[in-house]
Image: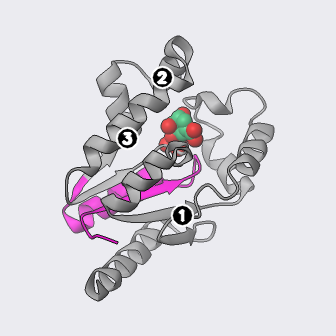
Amino acid sequence: MNANNIILIGFMGTGKTTVANILAKQLGWQDINSDEMIETAEGMPISRIFETKGEAYFREVETEALRTVLAGKERIVATGGGAVLKEENRDAMLKGGLVVALKASPDTIISRVREDASRPLLAGNLEERVVSLLKEREHAYDFAHFIIDTDVLTADQIAGRIKDYFHSAATEA
Ligand code: S3P
């Protein structure tokens, strides 16, 4: 592992953005959200990109955004939940820094994403969509250096665990 960046992966609603924000403040690093980068570059929300240009296009732009952001240093990168699906992205993440996976139970995820209509892949019956996508992606996040179960932890506690892991791994390396 290199200590250039910290990359947060995980299913939608696992708290990547919130934790990235806390970690960036605490470490004095740059806080980057790949979905936000894409929305700014494309000038429209993710849901609209899916609607007008399709998911395949979104995935291409996502790969490009990750490549750009991971070329830098001292960045906390919150990735979109599907960024792990391409091998090319997984390789770029593993080479770009410490990869941390945030996990949560279906119930936790459903309650966290319920009020937010911005995720095109969760349109329709929310419970069913979460359960079936979680099943599809059952092992998709397992390539991370460090995996945290977030169900019973606050965002501050999660950030604290990541910092501890990062400092001990960076000292060993
Ligand atoms: C997606 C997750 C979203 C966003 C897009 C697709 C996914 O990001 O990238 O809607 O495939 O899991 P969050 O994980 O930040 O919600």
Q: Is residue 110 magenta?
A: no
Query: Which of label 2 and label 3 is nearer to you?
Result: 2
Magenta-drawn segment = 1-30
The image shows residue 168 at horizontal and vertical percentages of 33, 85
When asked about the image quadrant of residue 51, the answer is: top right
Name the residue: 64% across, 60% down.
104
**Above or below: residue 20 compared with residue 148:** above
Q: The disc labelled 3 sits on which kind of residue?
A: Ser
On the image, numbered disc 2 is attached to which residue? 57
The image shows residue 36 at horizontal and vertical percentages of 36, 35
Name the residue: 34% across, 60% down.
95
In the displayed structure image, the side of residue 132 where residue 162 appears, left or right:
left
C-alpha gap between disc 2 and disc 3: 15 Å
Name the residue: 26% across, 41% down.
68
C-alpha gap between disc 1 and disc 2: 25 Å
The image shows residue 132 at horizontal and vertical percentages of 78, 43
Query: Which of label 3 and label 1 is nearer to you?
Result: 1
On the image, numbered disc 3 is attached to which residue? 34
Q: Are marks 1 and 2 in contact (CB under 8 Å)?
A: no
Q: The disc labelled 2 sits on which kind of residue?
A: Tyr
**Above or below: residue 23 compared with residue 1:** above
Q: Nearer the viewer, residue 2 or 148?
A: 2
The image shows residue 17 at horizontal and vertical percentages of 42, 50
